Image (cartoon, grey):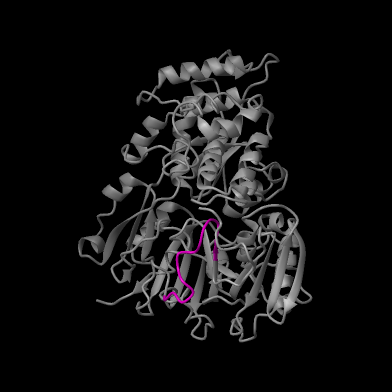
Amino acid sequence: MLAAGFATAEPRHGIAMYGEPQLPPDFVSLPYANPDAPTGGTIVTGEVGSFDSLNPHILKGSTPWQLRFLVYESLMGRSWDEPFTLYGLLAESIEVGPNREWAEFTLREEARFSDGSPVTVDDVMWSYETLGTVGHPRYHGVWNKIATMEQTGPRSVRFTFNVEDRELALIVGMRPILKKAQWDGRAFDESGIDIIPVTTAPYVISDFEAGRFVELSRDPDYWGKDLGFRRGTNNLDTIRMEFFGDGTAMFEAFKAGVLNSNREFNAEKWETQYDFPAIDVGEVVKSVIPHGRPSGMTGFVMNTRRPQFEDWRVREALITAFNFEYINETMTGSAQPRITSYFSNSILGMQDGPAEGRVRDFLEPFADDLLPGALEGYALPAGDGSARNRANLARAMDLMAEAGWTVQDGVMKNADGTPFTFEIVLSNGATEEQSIIDIYADALNRLGITPTITAIDSAQYTERTNAFDFDMTYFRRGLSLSPGNEQYLYWGCEAANTEGSRNLMGMCSPAAEAMIDRLLNSESRDDFLAAARALDRVLTSGRYVIPIYQWNISRIAHAKELRFPERVPIYGDWIGWQPDVWWWQDQ
């Protein structure tokens, strides 16, 4: 796992966080792509919600999330069959300093935008500065760690960093490259649906109707179709995303043939409701896709910026009152296991019992600030499976009392007589989350707590969550086998005070930041694993999210003509798999 091969600076075709890239410079295709896949066909998927922007790189507006990945390219591209390895895409090579204190990229001479114009160093430098200053906050962190950005040759650009961070050499290669001339005289951070982006990607936006659908078409003149990184990918002629008011309408559209691919997140529904005629006659098939990535965190997040959630005992009480076992039986027939920590289902997850070895060594300097369980061991409270869940509600009542809240005249109040209440904000159409919250609200009522449940349209929901204007809301954060700088965006102190960041819980933990720093600068696999497991303990014992069930497999029902390779990457059904390596094959 040592960073071999970079002691002296030389141009390379790829770069790995640890060790060497698995694929040689002349690789034919990514190992999970079919280089002989035919081209043609259409995939139509559904989304619940709406959109009012085609620019996924700014804070303003609501954008189809897929555009960020399907319509833009970066200097380097990621292999989802390796924990963290990048191969040249727009750049033909990367060169780094002995300690990765700088990274230099050389553009491919053949790289072109969709209008046929060449990709230049000027486009690259403009993109980085624009995204880093007026783009979405997700881009600001890396930009602030760049000391200098300079053109070093006709097709070369070098980034020199102002901090020690081994991952920056990789992260800096993953920013989308935009066409500078398209934005001359236009406000980048104010764009909406009036600008169709000119990009370098295999797909271009060919049609759309705000709030209803977006259609992407494969560019027959795409510049990079013969690259090893692209061979066997982007095989479908058309990618269409349809938008619906709720999940029920979307599922009915799939059954009616309006959509031809649908991910199912509910195990019981997968077993009991996928029995419609198209499946019976074999026109639609059901595929189960395994993966080896962490569970991530899915559930309901508490906003610790709000005074009612500042006390960890209150958060623990609300987690204890959440009757997961009964909810899981009701929603999935108990078919899906619960998320037990942020990195559960992977080697990065915290281990049971007290912290030991390097994990304890990393955490002990912060012992006075850590919450109970981080060092001693923490596990989510388990209910008895009954609807009333008496023991857990009694324990929740005790925790609330320890925090200064007691039931007075049937209402949970503090010593001043102020009722304990909070607002749960959900997006319209989130039928499963609404059903879970309805069950949860019944349990809270038995504690003398009556939450306000507010369902709003997707645009309002995005605006409110970006502004942290909620008490509790649905939360889903996917995590990878190579956690790095993005962890600051999820859990860092600066992100807690940056609107639009992904730190929805508002946590600010010196221990968490120290563990992230160790992740970024580990020079051995053992230290990397220990740092990840220590971070997992800090996050989980922080009691910020009420976890629900995990998806340790993916379930996709799709038209029989939609095919995918037998070799599935370690990340499974992840960004960069469907529709990237799928193809259409008539019977």
Q: Magenta stretch: residue 27 in it?
A: yes
Left or right: 549, with 476 as reference point: left
Task: Please state the total of marks drawn on the protein image.
Answer: 0
Residue 53 appears in the picture as rendered: no
- Name the spot of residue 568 as percent of width and height, x first: 36, 61
**Closer to the camera in the image, 52 or 564:** 564
Residue 115 appears in the picture as rendered: yes
- Name the spot of residue 401 as percent of width and height, x first: 59, 14
Residue that appears at 45% across and 64% down:
22
Left or right: 178, with 287 as reference point: right
Residue that appears at 52% across and 46% down:
476
- Name the spot of residue 422 as percent of width and height, x first: 61, 31
- Name the spot of residue 256 as percent of width and height, x first: 33, 63
**Closer to the camera in the image, 204 or 427:** 204
Q: Magenta stretch: residue 143 in it?
A: no
Outermost residue to the left: 281
**Closer to the camera in the image, 507 or 4:** 4
Q: Main secondary structure of the magenta part?
A: loop
Give the extent of the magenta segment.
15-28
Outermost residue to the front: 8
Determine whether 311 is above or below 416 in the image: below
Q: Quadrant of the C terminus?
A: bottom left
Determine whether 38 is above or below 552 in the image: below
**Closer to the camera in the image, 253 or 369:** 369
